[in-house]
Image: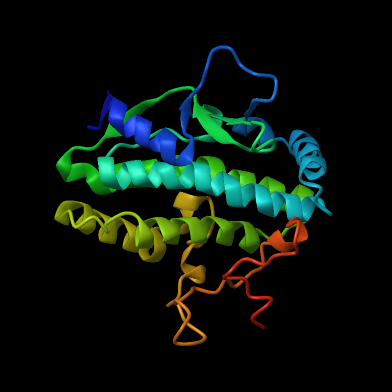
Amino acid sequence: MNKLSRIEQDEWDYLNEQWGLCEYSATRSESSVRASDLLDEERCSEYLDRLTALLQSPSRMTTASQFFKRYAFITSVPLLYAMTVYSKGLDLSAENCFIESSKSHPGLAHVSLAFVKAAMPESSERHDWRDTVVRRFFAGNLGELIAVMSKVANVPKPILWENVAVRVFSLYEKRIGVTGVQQEQSRAREDFHYLVHQAPGELFGEKQNPLSRFYGKPTCSSASEPSLRIRKTCCFYYEVSSVNEYCTNCPKWRS
């Protein structure tokens, strides 16, 4: 049976410094929004309209895409990092997450958790434990939120899922498992392969695994440029960029 443990202070400090993950304060700010509130279509629409004005975005669709790029970064990345590196499963279900804003990120600065204890697996039960961690977050948070935002903002679900996928790929390819620690490398390879190639769609709240379709080998256009995995969908970042800048892996300006 999995046991609950408070995450170590140095581990929590790292998750906070890198991705802004915080413990929820009892003194809730007026700008704080519980993620589960956004599963209501009316509340989600109102939130996106406020964010559209803050970002000076041309549409709800563009706003929803930019929201998910940020939201995936500050939720999925620390969750998976803690799962693979610390073997600790944080609760990032929609009910446990609060979305906070700040002056530098008026729309979405960081996420805080009301319940911060983590579930740790017994060595023989890691696969079942991993499924529980993944299902609670992806099916119980991202998947539901993607379904609602796709409907109220008229944004195709593949765009939002690819915004998630690029964060997952980057985490495992550029950060976890590159330290030379053999155990970490082994877990990173196993977890990454499972998430992309083996995890069933129901863990994500979908019929099929929504990450696998976006995984492919990076390519390079010239010997002087680094290899890149070009996106299959456009996230519309250029529509909110002050200089009409495209992402480096955008499919539009390479087509």
Q: In the drawing, does residue 128 fall left or right of residue 142?
A: left
Which residue is most to the bottom? 222
Q: Quadrant of the N terminus?
A: top left
Residue 139 shows in the view: no
**Residue 49 in sight in this render:** yes
**Residue at the spot 26% in from the left edge and 40% down from the top edge:** 86
Q: Quadrant of the C terminus?
A: bottom right
Residue 85, horizontal then vertical, whole percent: 27, 45
Q: Is residue 216 left or right of residue 158?
A: left
**x and y percent of residue 200 in the render?**
42, 58
**Whether residue 60 is situated above or below residue 230 in the rendered picture:** above
Q: Quadrant of residue 110?
A: top right
Q: In the orientation shown, which residue stands out farthest toward the top?
A: 27
Residue 242 image position (x, y, % from top left): 76, 56
Q: Residue 240 sits in which quadrant?
A: bottom right
Q: Is residue 35 left or right of residue 203?
A: right
